[in-house]
Amino acid sequence: MKNLIQYCIFLITLTFSLSTFADGFPKTPNLSITSGKLCDRPVKMRYPEQIAYCERDVTYQTKEIIISEYDQKGGYGIAKLPREDFKIDHLIPLCVGGSNDIANLWPQHKSVYALTDPLEPALCEKMSFGKLKQSDAVRIVIEGKTHLERIPALMNYLKKL
């Protein structure tokens, strides 16, 4: 319980500090650019539900296209910021059955992935034990990545499964 309270305080502090950043980068994925896509070229099937799994395969050129799209369509300045501060994130993680397709990728700042990254293994663990369906995992991960303030509640929900 103490860890959850500390995490909530951390999240509130970080969310406040994120809101003070200039809009040089997205704090959440833009769903009109990154709508999400499930794996359609699986290398294997995983979990009791037999979810299609794609191996990580995002080229440098694809990463540059993603950054350019967000800068042009979203009005950001990601290309001008330090590249090491970003990763190209899968909106629907590969372990949840996400694709490497451009429709599933977005440039995620390190201050954001510090919040969202713990959600992914928690979802995948629950899927591996058959305690969470893919459709629910997709809904949860999109909710968490588009509403950062909900991550503590989502993590708490997953812990109870």
Image: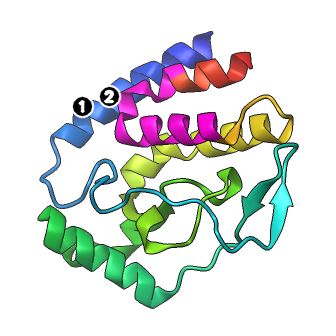
Q: Quadrant of residue 85?
A: bottom left
Image coordinates of residue 106 in percent, x first then y, are 39, 63
* Residue 74, placed above or below residue 31: below
Horizontal and vertical percent position of residue 156: 60, 19
State left or right for residue 65 relative to residue 99.
Answer: left
Alpha-carbon neighbours of circle 1 within 10 Å: few (<14), some, or many (≥20)? few
Residue numbers of the magenta segment: 135-153
Q: Is residue 76 visible?
A: no
Are the residues tagged 2 and 1 within 8 Å (C-beta)?
yes
Question: Residue 8 is drawn in which quadrant?
Answer: top left
Amino acid type at image mark 2? Thr
Residue at image coords 52%, 86%: 59
Residue 57 percent across, percent down from the top left: 62, 79
Task: Identify which residue is drawn at 34% across, 25% down.
Answer: 12
Looking at the figure, which quarter contains the N terminus? top right
**Residue 103 in picture, x, y percent from top left:** 42, 67
Tag of residue 44: none
Q: Which residue in the protein does label 1 denote?
A: 16
Residue closest to the far bottom: 61
Q: Which quadrant holds the C terminus? A: top right
Q: Nearer the viewer, residue 116 or 16?
A: 116
Q: Secondary structure at mark 2?
A: helix
Dominant SS in magenta: helix
Q: Up-down: is 57 above or below 38?
A: below
Which residue, given by chain and number where applicable, does mark 2 sit on?
13
Under circle 1, the secondary element is: helix
Judging depth in this view, the residue of 98 and 58 nearest the camera is: 98
Q: Residue at x 36, y 58 (%)?
A: 109
